[in-house]
Amino acid sequence: MYFDTIDSTNKFLKENWKELPSESVVWASKQIGGYGRMKREWVSPRGGLWFSVLFKPKNRPMNPWHYVRLYTMAVKDVLKKYKLDTIIKWPNDLLVNNKKICGILGEGIYTGKTFAAIIVGVGLNVNNRIPEELKNIATSYIEEKNKELNLERLLKQINSTAYYNYYIKYFKNNTISIFTKKWISNLNIRNGDFIKIISQNDEKRGKIVSIHGDYLEIMFENGIIENVYAGEVSLRKESE
């Protein structure tokens, strides 16, 4: 389903999920109300690839973070075919030389206390030029390679890779852990790395003890070890 301009592809699916089949895709040339994790504004001009996918899985894992990981891996694989190497920033971004090229948002829809559907929103900078004030933290395919990609073809390649290479193969209760380990091996952090943890209220520094799908086990500077969950913080990797 294509729109020239929309407020948010995720919002559209949240409002219409009951009427649409699983694996429905909504794509727009421009979003005027795009948002990311913690409801941060996501600038979505023409030239980028802005889309959302609806999942109403039966007998498959229902954790929204699995579906975020699904699309980080798919986008990474497809960009590699176009000679652009990326690395996954825990938990939901793709970076090129420490600059953000893609952000992925997973949202769950509940009926009562159980998940009824999961929506994954993908924002990928492709043919859009990055404003000067953001060039130190963001990039796009055209900024890196100085050439454009066909957005419709790219969309099909990403969804096909997500579905056939990962979803069908790994999204079962007895194999999802294999997929999570594969995802962890593609992250920009490792056990023992020093990181800055940024929440809405404060910043802390610590050392990674162990990495898991939904959380990190962190030893803070005061020696206390705590679990830090993906939905609550942002990370900055530090050299020391």
Image (cartoon, rainbow, N blue to C red):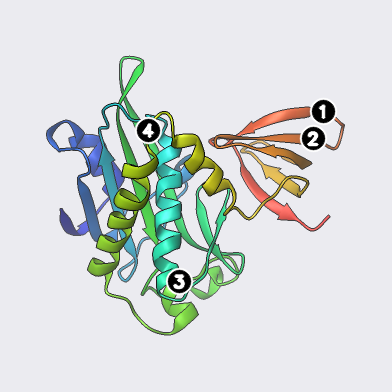
| Front disc: 4 or 2 | 4
Callout 3 amino acid:
Ser
Callout 1 amino acid:
Ile
Q: Are circles 1 and 4 on residues that touch, CB within 8 Å?
A: no
- Find residue 3 and report its image quarter: bottom left
| Front disc: 1 or 4 | 4
Query: N-terminal of the two: label 3 or label 4?
Result: 3
Residue tagged by mark 4?
172
Query: N-terminal of the two: label 2 or label 3?
Result: 3
Q: Tell me the residue at 59%/52% (across/down).
A: 187
Position in image of residue 143 (x %, y %): 47, 79
Spatial CA span between label 2 and label 1: 6 Å
Q: Are circles 2 and 3 on residues that touch, CB within 8 Å?
A: no
Q: Are circles 1 and 3 on residues that touch, CB within 8 Å?
A: no
Q: Are circles 4 and 2 on residues that touch, CB within 8 Å?
A: no
> Which residue occupies the foreground of this view, 122 or 198?
122
Callout 2 amino acid:
Met
Residue tagged by mark 1?
224
Residue tagged by mark 3?
140
Query: N-terminal of the two: label 2 or label 1?
Result: 2
Task: Say how many tags the image has.
Answer: 4
Position in image of residue 47 (x %, y %): 32, 71
Residue tagged by mark 2?
219
